[in-house]
Image: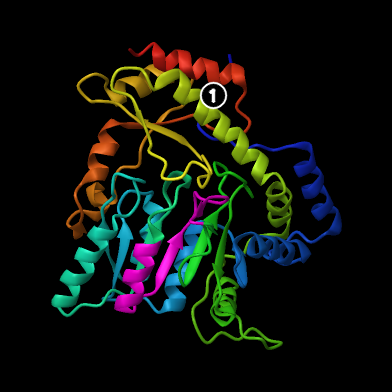
C-alpha cells in the first residue's frame, strides 16, 4: 500500500495544462500576465483592493512588517499556537515577538490575553508596533474583539490567513481583516503554487511599496538604481498560472475536506477521550486539517503517531506553541496556556482533497487500533 500523507498537493490535468500554457507563452520569470490575473482573482475572492503575489507566506509577512516600519527594538504581538513562520519575520526585522495564548472555543488567539498584554505593555510605556493574529487550521479567531482592541490602541493588525483560504468570520472572508493579510500556497495548503504566498491590503500605496521591495527595491529608471535594501520575493508567472487554475476548484476542495472531517468524526468521536477541534461555525471553516485531542491518561499522542508511521500513514502533532520553542526561550507570553495542553494531546489527521475513501478508511482503522 502507498504512503498516506497529511495534506499532499492535489494536482489535476487542468493544472498541467495551465502550467504548460504559461511555459509556452515564455513568461517564466517573476513577471507576466498570470501574476496580475492571480492577484486580481484573490482580491475579488476576499474583497481586498490590492494584492502582491510572492514566493511564500513568510515573505508576505516580512514585507508587511517592513512596510509598517518594524525595526530594531520594536515589539510585535503574535499568536503562540502556530508555525514558526508566523514569528520568524519579526526577528528578521530586528524586533522582538511577544506571544499571545489561545482560547478554547476556536484554539485561536485569546482576545482577553491580547487585552491583558496591551494593558500591561501600555502601563509600562511600551506600544507594540503590530499584532499578528493567526487563523489556525482554517478557522478564524474572534476577529471583532481583536480588531476593536487594535483600533483602541492604534496598533496595525496583520492577519495570518496562511491556512484559511476559503474560511470566513461573520460573513467576512479570511484574508479581509486588518491593515494587511496574507495567504500561503505551500504544497500542503488548500490550493498550491508549489511554493508561494499573497500579501493583501486595502492600501494600494502600501502594497506598491511592498511590490518594489519584493523586486530588490530597484528604482524605476533605465539603469540599476537602489536607494534601499530590497528582497527577491516575487512569485513566478508559471506558479501564478498554477494557483489561478487551482483557485477555480476551491469550493470543491473545501467540500472534499469537509467530507473527510465528517467521516472521521462519525467514526472516531465515540472513542474514549477523543474530542475534535471545536468549530464556532461549521459553515465558516475550510477544513484544511481535521484535528482532534486525546485524554492523555488514556492515549499517548507520540505512540499513536509512531504506530501510524509504521503503517505508512502520516499524522502530525498539533503545533508546538512558539513560547515553548527553544529558539524563542525567554520571550514574554500572555495567556492561560490552553495551547500547551492542546500540543501535548492533539494530532492532525490526513485531510488532503486527493485522499480517497479507501485511504481514509485505512486511517480510521489505524487510529481505532490504538485503543
Residue 329 visible, this angle = yes
Query: Which residue is nearer to you in this view: 274 or 183?
Result: 274
Question: Magenta span covers which residues?
Answer: 144-170
- Residue 357 lies in quadrant: top right
Q: Is residue 164 above or below residue 359?
A: below
Give the class, few, some or many, for how many residues have Cα within 10 Å of label 1's Cα (few <14, many ≥20). many
- Residue 303 lies in quadrant: top left
Please, what secondary structure does the residue beneath circle 1 have? loop
Query: Which residue is nearer to you in this view: 283 or 1?
Result: 283
Q: In this view, does 37 lie to the left or right of 287?
A: right
Measuring from the top left, give residue 336's x and y in whole percent: 19, 49
Residue placed at 59% from the left, 68% from the top?
48
Residue placed at 48% from the left, 69% from the top?
180
Residue 352 visible, this angle = no
Measuring from the top left, give residue 182's x and y in whole percent: 51, 61
Query: Which residue is nearer to you in this view: 318 or 168?
Result: 168
Residue placed at 51% from the left, 50% from the top?
164
Q: Is residue 56 left or right of residue 222?
A: left
Report the residue that reaches farthest toward the left: 124
Measuring from the top left, give residue 345's x and y in whole percent: 28, 31
Question: Which residue is label 1 attached to?
Answer: 4
Query: Which residue is nearer to you in this view: 231 or 274?
Result: 274
Q: In this view, does 340 lie above or below 117?
A: above
Q: Image quadrant for the C terminus?
A: top left
Q: In this view, does 77 lie to the left or right of 164?
A: left
Amino acid at each position: 500500500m502507498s504512503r498516506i500523507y497529511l495534506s499532499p498537493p492535489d494536482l489535476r490535468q487542468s493544472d498541467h495544462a495551465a502550467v504548460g500554457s504559461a511555459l509556452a507563452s515564455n513568461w517564466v520569470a517573476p513577471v507576466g500576465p498570470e501574476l496580475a490575473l492571480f492577484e486580481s482573482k484573490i482580491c475579488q475572492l476576499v474583497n481586498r483592493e490590492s494584492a502582491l503575489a510572492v514566493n511564500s507566506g513568510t515573505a508576505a509577512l516580512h514585507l508587511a512588517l517592513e512596510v509598517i516600519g518594524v525595526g530594531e527594538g520594536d515589539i510585535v504581538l503574535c499568536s503562540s499556537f502556530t508555525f514558526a513562520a508566523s514569528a520568524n519575520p519579526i526577528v528578521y526585522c530586528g524586533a522582538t515577538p511577544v506571544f499571545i495564548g489561545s482560547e478554547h472555543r476556536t484554539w485561536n488567539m485569546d482576545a482577553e490575553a491580547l487585552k491583558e498584554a496591551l494593558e500591561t505593555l501600555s502601563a509600562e510605556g511600551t506600544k507594540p508596533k503590530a499584532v499578528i493574529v493567526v487563523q489556525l487550521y482554517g478557522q478564524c479567531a474572534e476577529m471583532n474583539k481583536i480588531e476593536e482592541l487594535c483600533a483602541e490602541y492604534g496598533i496595525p493588525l496583520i492577519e495570518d490567513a496562511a491556512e484559511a483560504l476559503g474560511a470566513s468570520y461573520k460573513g467576512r472572508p479570511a484574508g479581509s481583516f486588518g491593515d494587511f493579510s496574507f495567504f500561503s500556497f505551500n504544497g500542503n495548503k488548500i490550493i498550491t503554487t508549489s511554493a508561494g504566498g499573497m500579501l493583501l491590503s486595502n492600501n494600494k500605496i502600501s502594497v506598491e511599496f511592498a511590490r518594489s521591495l519584493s523586486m530588490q527595491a530597484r528604482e524605476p529608471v533605465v539603469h540599476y538604481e537602489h536607494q534601499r535594501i530590497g528582497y527577491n520575493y516575487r512569485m513566478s508567472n508559471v506558479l501564478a498560472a498554477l494557483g489561478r487554475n487551482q483557485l477555480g476548484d476551491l469550493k470543491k476542495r473545501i467540500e472534499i475536506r469537509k467530507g473527510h472531517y465528517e467521516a472521521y468524526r462519525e467514526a472516531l468521536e465515540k472513542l474514549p477521550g477523543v474530542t475534535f477541534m471545536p468549530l464556532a461555525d461549521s459553515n465558516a471553516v475550510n477544513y484544511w486539517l481535521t484535528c482532534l485531542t486525546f485524554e492523555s491518561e488514556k492515549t499517548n499522542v507520540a505512540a499513536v503517531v509512531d504506530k501510524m508511521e509504521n503503517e505508512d500513514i502520516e499524522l502530525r502533532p498539533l503545533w508546538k506553541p512558539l513560547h515553548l520553542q527553544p529558539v524563542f526561550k525567554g520571550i514574554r507570553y500572555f495567556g492561560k496556556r490552553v495551547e500547551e495542553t492542546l500540543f501535548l494531546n492533539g494530532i492532525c489527521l490526513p485531510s488532503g482533497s486527493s485522499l480517497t475513501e479507501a485511504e481514509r478508511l485505512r486511517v480510521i482503522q489505524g487510529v481505532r487500533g490504538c485503543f
